Amino acid sequence: MTENHSHREPIAVIASGGGMSCSYAAGAMVALAKEHRFTTPDFLIAGSGSAGTFAYYASKQYTNIAGVWLDLLSTRKFINRFRLWKIIDVDYLIDIIFKVKNHIDVDAMLASPITLLIAATDADTGDLTYFSDKEREDKREIFEFLRASKAMPIAFNRLIPIDGRRYCDSELSANLRAHVREAVRRGATRIIAINNSVPRLEASLAMAVWTRLRPRVFRERYREQWEELKHFRVPLGVRVELLEPSGGIPVSTLTSSRSGVRTTYDMGYRDMVGHKGIRDLLGIN
């Protein structure tokens, strides 16, 4: 397929969060680039566990996506359930993996025509926020956007300062429906939506406890946005193709099993290759 952007409708690729279950989106995104040869959507929108994958995709570092998920994340340096004060070490992910071992090429990202939007939640007001790679002068800020998007309450237990405010991960900023709405708001009329979500009782319970401990203004605004999403409908003229596992996947939010991650990655890859609706949306025979 030869990409032609001169007269096409705006395309967004979005993905939900879900911790290590986002290895599904990782495989799907590599297949999108290598098998479908589609590398320049107008928008990439993700939060939480999918945000790093989308950063590599925006900078055209497709082999790095596989390298991170299949080789570098299955270590206790990143996820350790016995390290109760920091079960998931987001600083290790950002400062060692994304900056050193498998460096995200921020210059290539900023030179790309793609707008990358990284979702995070304001920890004081509850507002869902999208940070754009194209709206900042300091290119190093992209790493702080990623850190904020992945800063899971309780499991990482730190809020990330950006522009004088504090941000973190949440089920809201990891939500696929929220990203569909943002894609529509930005003008996308064709959307490839990747859903990694699996039942995450452990993470959901932890998030519920944390939310109850937030200030009243946070709780009210957070609930208000969930209500808004319940009533959101995709407008006429906007096409959404959903990619998600047809059955269960062998990983969860905080699973670090190398074999489970590999299996889930391969599922995402195969599902993207075989998805007839996405092939049709992209004009692939």
Image: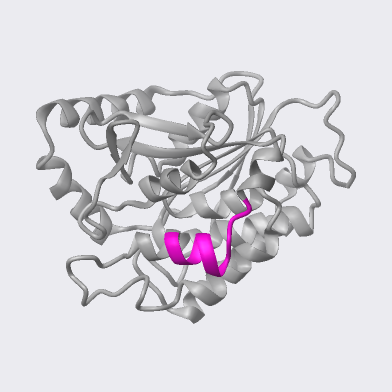
Would residue 12 appear left or right of 21 to someone viewing this image?
A: right
Residue 134, image x, y percentages = 58, 31
Using the image, determine if residue 234 lies above or below residue 26: above
Residue 265, image x, y percentages = 58, 67
Residue 31, image x, y percentages = 71, 59
At a point 13% along the width and 38% down the height, the residue shown is 214
At a point 75% along the width and 38% down the height, the residue shown is 281
At a point 59% along the width and 56% down the height, the residue shown is 104
Using the image, determine if residue 226 lies above or below residue 211: above
Q: Quadrant of residue 154?
A: bottom left
Residue placed most toward the observer, 59 or 257 = 59
Q: Quadrant of residue 28?
A: bottom right
Which portion, as a residue range, is magenta? 95-105
Q: Does the magenta run of residues contain 8?
A: no
At a point 40% along the width and 55% down the height, the residue shown is 18
Q: Is residue 270 visible?
A: no
Colouring: one colour
Residue 242, image x, y percentages = 59, 44
Q: Does the magenta run of residues contain 99?
A: yes
Would residue 162 appear left or right of 277 to someone viewing this image?
A: left
Q: Is residue 202 visible?
A: yes
Q: Name the outermost residue toward the front.
A: 138
Would residue 83 appear left or right of 253 to someone viewing this image?
A: left
Q: Name the outermost residue toward the top.
A: 236
Disc tally is 0
